[in-house]
Image: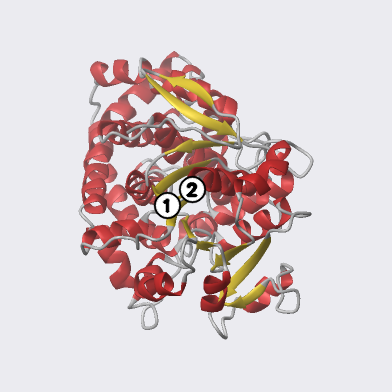
Amino acid sequence: MDTTFTSKVFDTETIRLAETEETIVRGGRDKFPLLPAAFEGIRQIGVIGWGSQGPAQAQNLRDSLEGTDIRVKVGLREGSGSMASAREAGFTEESGTLGEMYAVIGESDMVILLISDAAQVENYQKIFASMKDGATLGLSHGFLLGYLESVGEKFPAGMNVIGVCPKGMGPSVRRLYVQGKEINGAGINCSFAVEQDIDGRATDQALGWAIGLGAPYVFKTTLGYEYRSDIFGERGILLGAVHGISEAMYRRLVMEKGLGEKEAFIATVENITGPLSRTISHEGIIAVYNRLDDEGKKTFERMYSAAYHPAFEILLEIYDEVSSGNEIRSVVMAGKRFDRYPMGRIDGTRMWRIGEEVRAERSGEPELNPETAGLYCAVMMAQIDLLLEKGHCYSEVCNESVIEAVDSLNPYMHFKGVAHMVDNCSTTARLGSRKWAPRFDYNIMQQAFVDFDGGKEANQDLVGAFRGHKIHDVLATVATMRPSVDISLTE
């Protein structure tokens, strides 16, 4: 994949990641004065939808474009229950910043489509027909492209089609932007893609959109690579896998190892969302291993060796299901069942009730548990290896498998539990987590724990590959472009 690009508006730079070079743009509030030039010819940006991403993107763009003559207008279905929430955020009919979905689409020069993936599939023909000639269609996910490919259709020829994909859930996009009002570079990293460019402006429109959202840095991908890595990643370490392996490890420690329930929760979930996430965020994955003493390293190595292949097996299946269009079709079909069978709770079990007690009693960070560390890092590294094998660029791999997990998602599980993390995400992500978490739970319990508890020695080839992996140097470079503040969650 070619990750180079040029911009007429923003300064670009080239970074070296392992054996590759990528072009990036650094964001920051000092770039906001350049946004009118990036959005040349655009007088209204219509943000369509008010789900996970809609509130964050609409508010961030509005705030970033304050003082310009570019209007951000929210478009929602007639009678939508989200109208009241949009009004509370300052978008109103009286000010001309809130309106009916198709009216806003028809009058906007740039349409950022943030309704659910299933709704995009159901309504895309009417959406395309409602757009102005020569307007720009903006997507924050390549799901619609994946669907169109699966049915042999394409985007209409007379429009720009771009993607800007924040590497975090919508609440994180807004939260870090608000936290960073006085701090340059506080936000969520974004990838961007140009699917169609009819007037030579698409790249700068995408870069302006990403910077307007507050992205510390912006890197290039394609919508095809994006939807494969994104749908795959949220079913993997970002949501599905972290849920599944937490359940498996907690149950093993309580039922088979006789650990107390609170101690087991601390050794699993609190470890993942505490010292593991913090260490990986600031120092990289290898730092987790290096922090352990000699016995801890041996334990880590045995668990890593036991878990890597069972995790890779499921991740490969997920990637194939996404690439083939099966997972996309599954999401579309599920959307048709929601009126009858809405998604149920995922945090009502004994484990997550114990978690509420643990969070209420917190007093400092727990010690790093080498078993949990080996398990979590094995799944994360398996996901990294699979994405690299499939040709994804290093920036995309790092953001979809590491940065989004530890800087955007895990803090929500740390704050209020698994449902608070999963159910603040898109419908597609929520469905994927529920579908695949049990598969990780099963494979890890049936294979990894059996081998580990049976005393199987570490696979030194796997351990050596982990210790010498290129991703560690890549993460050290990419870490210089992480958000300039850590996300802070409050009631």
Report the colour scheme. secondary structure
Left or right, 381 with respect to 179, comes to left
Residue 119 badge: none
Residue 284 on image: x %, y %: 50, 25
Left or right, 461 with respect to 437, comes to left
Density class for disc 2 (Cα within 10 Å; few <14, some 14-19, many ≥20) is many
Residue 259 on image: x %, y %: 45, 42
Residue 414, visible in the rendered structure: no
Residue 321, visible in the rendered structure: yes
Task: Give above or below for 188 relative to 5.
Answer: below
Left or right, 382 with respect to 250, comes to left
Q: Quarter of the image containing the N terminus? A: top left
Looking at this rendering, what residue extends furthest in the bottom direction? 79
User: Closer to the camera, 162 or 115?
Assistant: 162
| Residue at the disc numbered 2 | 202
Judged from the image, the secondary structure of the residue bearing numbered disc 2 is helix
User: Closer to the camera, 171 or 58?
Assistant: 58
| Residue at the disc numbered 1 | 198
